[in-house]
Amino acid sequence: MDSLEEFWGIMLGREPAAICALWRSLPADEQQAVSAHLQRMVSEDGWHDQQRLSARIALDALADMVMNDGDANDSGAPEAGPDV
């Protein structure tokens, strides 16, 4: 990945397949950091509604990936949360 802008463009791009492919390319520590950031985006004040929606779509895509892969504990993917 060449830049943070490109990374977040994919992660918040609302394309589940691209989100999951990018996620799988990350080491576990980076997965944890990204997960925490996405969780903050959907739960903290100060984010635009469209940013919240993009973060929610990413979290949902990752949760779906975990359910389909059947290995939630090893993937580092976040659980799906409440709709925002």
Image (cartoon, grey):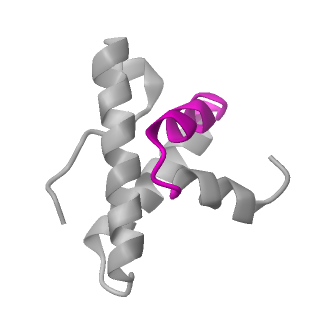
Residue sitting nearer the eye, 43 or 3: 3
Res 49 → quadrant: bottom left
Residue farthest along the top direction in this orientation: 70
Look at the image and say whether residue 32 sits in the magenta stretch.
no
Q: Is residue 2 left or right of residue 15?
A: right
Residue drawn where x is 26% and y is 69% of the image: 43
Q: Is residue 60 left or right of residue 8?
A: left
Residue drawn where x is 80% and y is 59% of the image: 3
Q: Residue 47, percent across and down? A: 39, 81
Residue drawn where x is 30% and y is 43% of the image: 60
**Up-down: is 49 above or below 22?**
below
**Up-down: is 70 above or below 60?**
above
Q: Residue 65, percent across and down? A: 38, 26
Q: Is residue 49 left or right of residue 81?
A: right
For the C terminus, give its image quadrant: bottom left
Q: Which residues are magenta?
A: 12-28
Residue sitting nearer the eye, 23 or 53: 53
Residue sitting nearer the eye, 6 or 44: 6
Q: Residue 32, percent across and down? A: 49, 43
Residue drawn where x is 23% and y is 43% of the image: 80
